[in-house]
């Protein structure tokens, strides 16, 4: 019994010692580099160290208890199929984790859009990846899902597209309609954060309750918070200028016509 306690005490010390070296030297080095890939390698190394030393400790304990380690390892061939089946998800996620690290479809800090929502990559582990959502909650996504399902890396975009409709009331004159188009176009043209000569403002359609202007433009900004700030400023400018020119926005409404009948 004392041997078992001794082995696991030494194992715990070795795990903490190795992880301490990683934190002392590798993390300090990674924090000074611009690349994010060495940052995501560190959690992987920590996990591997824990697994390796734990397996070694278990084998030493089993050997001390009189078990034939060679026979146990050979016996894995017999029970290997059952073990592989039982740990199928673990193995798959581990292999997909390696694929993510090698192919680098995303890195720490990237903004991802998955079936679970929109969030920032916090940690890429052996089995799963942790993502921080904009609700300040952490979701843990198996690596298999991130590799086999569609994942949109928003941070990789050269520019973010904004595509929306501005509805004006049906009483808007042609003169004011043209004025509205020019206002939006000038705001986009004068904005230094908008890709020049790529925006579009057009009288698109007659809606059920509005005259619809289609507005499309691109913002070459990777930072999502900055993108929202630019978009906010554009929307505020449009609202201000429309108010100055007394151009009215439409809202869902119905008009009821009553007729008198002569009896």
Image (cartoon, rainbow, N blue to C red):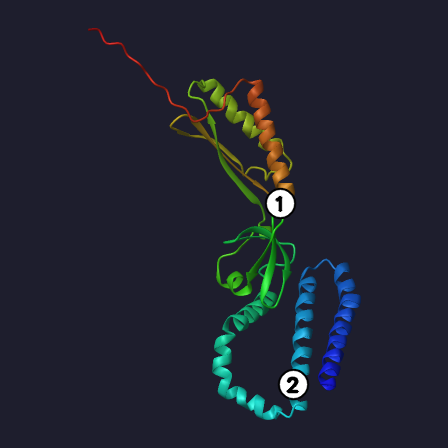
Query: Which element carries disc 2, helix, strand or loop?
Result: helix
Image location (x, y in percent) of residue 205: 40, 30
Q: CA distance from mark 1 to mark 2?
A: 49 Å
Q: Kindly identify which residue carries mark 1.
A: 224
Check the image and name the residue furthest to the left.
263
Query: Which element carries disc 1, helix, strand or loop?
Result: helix
Q: Residue placed at 41% from the left, 24% from the top?
A: 253
Q: Kindly identify which residue carries mark 2.
A: 59
Image quadrant in which you'd find residue 170: top left
Q: Nearer the viewer, mark 1 or mark 2?
A: 2
In the picture provided, is 160 more to the left or to the right than 2? left
Q: Is residue 255 above or below residue 18?
A: above
Q: Nearer the viewer, residue 159 or 255?
A: 255
Specify few, some or many for label 1: CA neighbours under 10 Å numbering under 14, 14-19, or 20 or more: few
Image location (x, y in percent) of residue 164: 49, 36
In the picture provided, is 124 more to the left or to the right than 173? right
Q: Residue placed at 59% from the left, 61% from the top?
A: 129
Image quadrant in which you'd find residue 240: top right
């Amino acid at each position: 019994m004392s041997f078992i306690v001794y082995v696991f005490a030494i194992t715990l010390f070795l795990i903490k010692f190795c992880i301490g070296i990683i934190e002392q030297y590798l993390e300090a080095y990674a924090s000074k580099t611009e690349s994010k890939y060495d940052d995501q390698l560190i959690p992987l190394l920590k996990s591997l160290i824990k697994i390796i030393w734990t397996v070694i400790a278990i084998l030493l304990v089993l050997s001390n208890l009189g078990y034939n380690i060679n026979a146990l390892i050979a016996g894995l061939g017999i029970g290997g199929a059952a073990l592989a089946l039982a740990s199928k998800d673990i193995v798959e996620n581990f292999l997909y984790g390696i694929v993510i690290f090698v192919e680098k479809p995303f890195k720490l800090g990237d903004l991802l859009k998955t079936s679970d929502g929109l969030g920032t990559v916090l940690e890429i582990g052996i089995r799963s990846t942790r993502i921080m959502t904009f609700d300040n909650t952490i979701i843990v996504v198996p690596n298999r899902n991130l590799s086999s399902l569609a994942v949109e890396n928003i941070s990789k975009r050269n520019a973010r597209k904004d595509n929306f409709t501005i509805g004006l009331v049906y009483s808007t004159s042609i003169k004011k309609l043209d004025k509205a188009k020019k206002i939006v176009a000038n705001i986009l043209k004068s904005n230094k954060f908008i890709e020049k000569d790529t925006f579009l403002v057009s009288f698109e359609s007659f809606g059920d309750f509005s005259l619809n202007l289609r507005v499309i433009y691109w913002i070459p900004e990777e930072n999502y918070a900055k993108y929202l700030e630019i978009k906010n400023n554009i929307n505020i400018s449009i609202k201000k200028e429309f108010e100055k020119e007394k151009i009215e926005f439409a809202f869902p409404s119905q008009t009821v016509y009553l007729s008198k009948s002569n009896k």
